[in-house]
Image: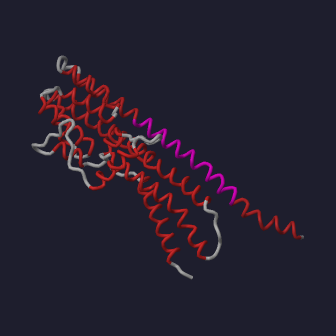
Amino acid sequence: MNLFPMVLTGGTIGAGVALLVRELLRPQPALAVALERTAPGRLTLPGAELELNRDEVWGRWLLARLGRLPGVRIPTTNLALLGQGPGQFMLKKTALAGVGLLCPVLVTIPWIVTGVSVPFYVPAIVGLAIAGLLFITPDLAVRDQAKRAREEFAHALAAYLDLVALKRAADAGPAEALEKAAAVGRGWPFLYLQGALRRARLEKIPPWQALEELKHQYDLPVLDDVADIMRGSATDGAAVYKALRARTAALNTELLAVQAAEANAASEKMTAPGALLAVLVMLLMAFPAVIRMLTV
């Protein structure tokens, strides 16, 4: 028997599963955009585009031809937060859909080799269903990754506000406190804050305005009150320390409540498997006695 079709089928299915697992994993947001923004002497102006790699070029070519189809939506805000380009996102969707179309066809090759006839419409229908499922997988993965990235940004912002409050208590100005506190961190949330504040300094705009633009650009609701607090600090610097500490305490309480809710949800998900395991153990223990009663 020729093993080549089976090997080819297994390799294709394995590649599809590997791509699916890679999409569902939780990667860190790409830091290229933030590092490019915070590089010394480098300012990314609105409308300016960085050099595109090959994947982004091919993806934008596909996006120009498939982006207007019904059901095709590009989550530009979430992609910007994760540091991913719309072209790469579209290329992933198309590649996964192509794998979904090919998998059923390749699976039927061993059956055809062994002489079993398979109707043509069966792999076609199954392939379309798998392709549709894999086509929306990147959307779900990006939504989940962006949600986790916003949670991580909220945790970093709580520490950042504490630092800003300490700088203000040390008689630092509003802009100076914001910039010095952002310069302490090395994570991607601090890099985003550094980039926004550096752009504010170079463009001669208030730093709280840059924070508002950062909030709208990446859909970061945790920055809602920060800009207002720092705007008020320009006129009432005595009360800003208490306002920042109160905002930090409220944010920490909110994050703890979210974590507690997630822990409770995870515990509830484990209830059903635990109950099923207990039932199986009881059945296993009672099986010999039941069999003996039935055979006597």
Task: Find the residue positioned furthest to the bottom.
Answer: 1
User: In the depicted view, which residue is nearer to us: 208 or 77?
Assistant: 77
Left or right of 63 in this view: 37: left
Residue 146 falls in which quadrant of the image?
A: top left
106 relative to 170 in the view: left or right = right
- Whether residue 263 is in magenta: the answer is yes
Q: Quadrant of the C terminus?
A: bottom right
Magenta stretch: includes residue 185: no
Q: Residue at x 36, y 52 (%)?
A: 27
For the magenta stretch, what is the residue range?
Answer: 255-280
- Tell me: residue 16, above or below residue 52: below
The residue at 20%/32% (across/down) is 166
**Viewer-closest of 118 and 192:** 118
How many callouts does the rendering have?
0
Q: Classify residue 37 by image quadrant.
A: top left
User: Can you give x and y, in whole percent of width and height, for residue 142 in the image?
Assistant: 40, 45
Whole-percent x, y for residue 198 in the image = 15, 36
Rendered residue at 24%/49% (across/down): 32
Name the residue at the left extreme.
41
- Residue nearer the viewer, 174 or 224: 224
Residue 263 coordinates in the image, percent (x, y): 49, 43
Extreme-top residue of the structure:
235
Is 237 left or right of 152, judged from the image as shown?
A: left
> Colour scheme used in the picture?
secondary structure
Mostly what secondary structure, the magenta segment? helix
Locate the N terminus by quadrant: bottom right
Residue under the image location 19 percent in, 46 percent down: 36
The percent coordinates of residue 179 (x first, y second) are: 16, 35
Left or right: 128 in relation to 277: left
